[in-house]
Amino acid sequence: MLEIGAILEGKITGLTNFGAFVSLPDGKSGMVHISEVSSSFVKDIKDFLKEGQIVKVKVVGISEEGKISLSIRKAEAPKEPREQKEGAPQRPRRNNDRPRANVWQGQPSKNKEAMSFEDMMAQFKQASDEKLSDLKRSADFKNGTRRGK
């Protein structure tokens, strides 16, 4: 019995500019839309698939008419987030890589309960002004102009 969520192997029987037709077990066939071929952008499906290729697909939908929607990218195991490799050098800190104020990173301040709305807005404005000043200073330095001289 074919059901949504099932992962099957099938054979590519046809390619179009909008997807690929896949022959499934039990003589059924389904279609993989071009957006479900890969997690990266697919401009030309022929760069990713060939007729006769065996692919692993996940059933993502079955219409009332019996049309089967498939996904190759959802059938793939989810990729683990990249982690810092052991022993790999970390990017050296630059002089202007100072930690930002709590408001920029969305972290609550230590005594948030004691702060009024006006105090929080003043803290935000101060951090914002500092950041804007840093951006202007770095832009002026890159352009070779130094204000105040």
Image (cartoon, helix red, strand yellow):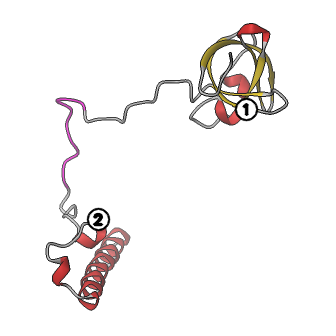
Q: Is residue 130 magenta?
A: no
Check disc 2 and report its element: helix, strand or loop. Answer: helix
Q: Which residue is mark 1?
A: 33
Q: Write down the region rendered in magenta.
A: 85-93
- Do labels 2 and 1 touch, CB within 8 Å? no
* Residue 19 can be seen, yes or no: yes
Disc 2 crowd, CA 10 A, few/some/many (<14, 14-19, 20+): few
- Mark seen at residue 105: 2
The foreground one among 133 and 44 is: 44
Q: Amino acid at mark 2?
A: Gln
Q: Quadrant of the N terminus?
A: top right
Give residue 17's position: percent from left, percent from top: 80, 31
Give residue 137's position: percent from left, percent from top: 30, 76
- Residue at the (74%, 8%) spot, across then down: 26
Quick one: label 2 or label 1, which is nearer the N terminus?
1
Give residue 55's position: percent from left, percent from top: 63, 15
The foreground one among 42 and 9 is: 9
